[in-house]
Image (cartoon, rainbow, N blue to C red):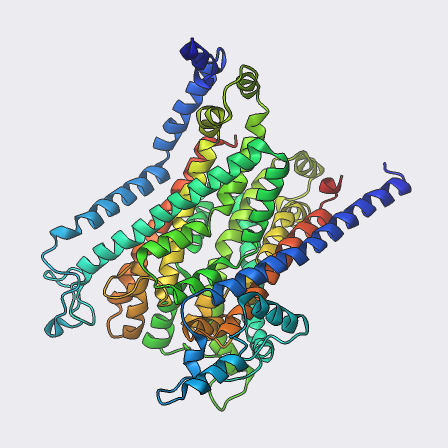
Amino acid sequence: MHDVRYELLNPATLGSKQVTYTERRETVLYRLFHDRRAVTAGSVLVLLTIICLLAFLSPYDPNQLSIMDKLHAPSWAHWFGTDDHGRDYFTRILYGGQVSLAVGLLSMLIAVSLGTIVGTVSGYLGGVIDGLFMRFLDVFMSLPSFFILMILNAYLKPSVQNMIIIIGLLSWMDVARIVRSQTMSIKEQEFMLYARSIGVRMWRTIFKHLIPGVMPSIVVAASLNVANAILTESALSFLGLGVQPPASSWGSMLNNAQGYLGTASYLAIFPGVLILIVILSFNVIGDALRDALEPTE
Amino acid sequence: MATPSLLFWRELRLSRMILRRMLQIVPLLFVISVISFALVKLSPGDPVKMFVTPNMHPEDVERIRRSLGLNLPIYEQYFRWLGQIVHGNLGYSLQNSQPVLGQILQRLPATIGLMGTALAATLIIAIPLGLVAAKYENTWIDRLLNMISYISISIPVFWFGILLIEFFSVKLNWLPSLGMQTIGENSFVDLAQHAILPVTTLTFQGCGAYYRYVRSNTLSEIRKSYVEFGHAKGLSIWKLLWSHILKNVMLPVITLLGMSLPTLISGAYITESVFSWPGLGLLSVDAIFSLDYPIIMAMTLFSGLMLILGNLFADMTYQFVDPRIRK
């Protein structure tokens, strides 16, 4: 009996809605995979991630100092040259990439989960709770977040875990705002009213029926969020307030490269180009997703 | 048509809304002051350590602690700090014992000059480019500009700064890379030479967002009936773009401007650090590295205030500029 009810409630199988929903899903994926920008950006990201994860295959130790090999220009032995301590730069770039990507993706997960919870609860319940949550959001929106990040990293020991948590906790607000407004409009739709009227519990309504509807906006926000998180991490590390040596991220490598402008420019070129490519790809995917979900024509 | 009395009520409602928003600033600032205080005070690290020398007597250390008011309970410290701030006293820097407010005011012109110039350049470049791209939608000009705008919004600003220094200062030796003035020289040309690279960095970074705003808004405006009417009347597309469409496109641009007000004052942390530009950004970053908490707390509060005012300004202009929203 319960299952039948559930089938009735599921928007994907709800009478005439069935056609529109499946159609929409297919066309979104179809549009996305036929968007040359999105496919290129996606492939670049997947490829870069795989290469960074394969860093352990490198014959060089990323932290092995070797004074004899200081500042060698790129060659067959050292593809990206060596840094000021004689470490193989290509290997360090790969390990640094793992850190940069991990910080970006994991802090995005924190921000998106937090933003989704606050946004759905606030939009769904409305009233006093909504008012409270929105004041809370106002406070967070008024915090100079990059400045706070710098302060926290200066006082706390800036480990990778700390950075992920702090960046995540300071960047959920946009997601919450988007999710809240979407929730409020979906809440008014008929299938939600039906669910409430036959007595489906609140959390089940939220997870089974509301969040799937809000998901597209969340995905778009998530992809732009990763780009911002990576940029924030690299800026912090560049200022010397992020990842600490001997560990490295692309940002901290740029910080180090500042001392070798003119003598070993490649030290600044490689990490910078990679940050640019990754952020560009996430931005392009975010835009392509938005276009695929809401075609303007 | 609205009668005068109706208009009066509308204006009244509008000013009430603004008044309410302005009153909200006070509790928001209070919360931010608590946060900025707690952030610094609850963090590990003893500020007294900065004054302690190895052969100092414990009693002297205690005296320093008392003179800084650090022996009081935390809430009492907070209210003393707040009381001082309300009287315009932001405390004294731990590094050079100068008043914090004086240092902020002294650094303010450098930051405003840099950011203001960059913002003006951004608008002058981005708005016409956005209009042109929309006019030539889907041609090679549009595609090229779109690509550049993607790079502009994605490029790490510090890396772009480094590249400019590398090329124009180190390789070509055309422009100075650090500071605001050559020591001993006090001419406008010298200042301008120092400003070119940081202004270029900030402008390139800013252009992408404004360009994309202007382009997408122009595209939606261009399809509206008043544009069609203008066409039928025999107006050229440039005339239409410049004197009719631009007006409507500027609305979201003004909102974006309001939101960039806080960065105008304090957001140049990174650019100022890269180019050692002696403004508020550099002051804050230096203070953070030396854990100079009076400056840190003052700058947090100051940045928070700017953010609140920026958002308020954006909302208000939005209401004033577009009569449709007022209804």
Relative side of B325 to B156, left or right? right
Where's residue B203, x and y in %? 50, 62
Q: Residue furthest front?
A: B59
Q: Residue at x 58, y 32 (%)?
A: A125
Q: Quadrant of residue A235?
A: bottom left
Where's residue A69, x and y in %? 12, 71
Q: Which quadrant holds the N terminus of chain A?
A: top left
Where's residue A135, x and y in %? 60, 47
Relative side of B161 to B127, left or right? left
Count up the numbered dots.
0
Location of residue A86 with respect to B216 vertically, above or below: below
Location of residue B50 with respect to A36 vertically, above or below: below
Closest to the observer, A76 or A119: A119
Q: Quadrant of residue B27?
A: bottom right
Q: Residue at x 37, y 50 (%)?
A: A279
Closest to the observer, A202 or A108: A202
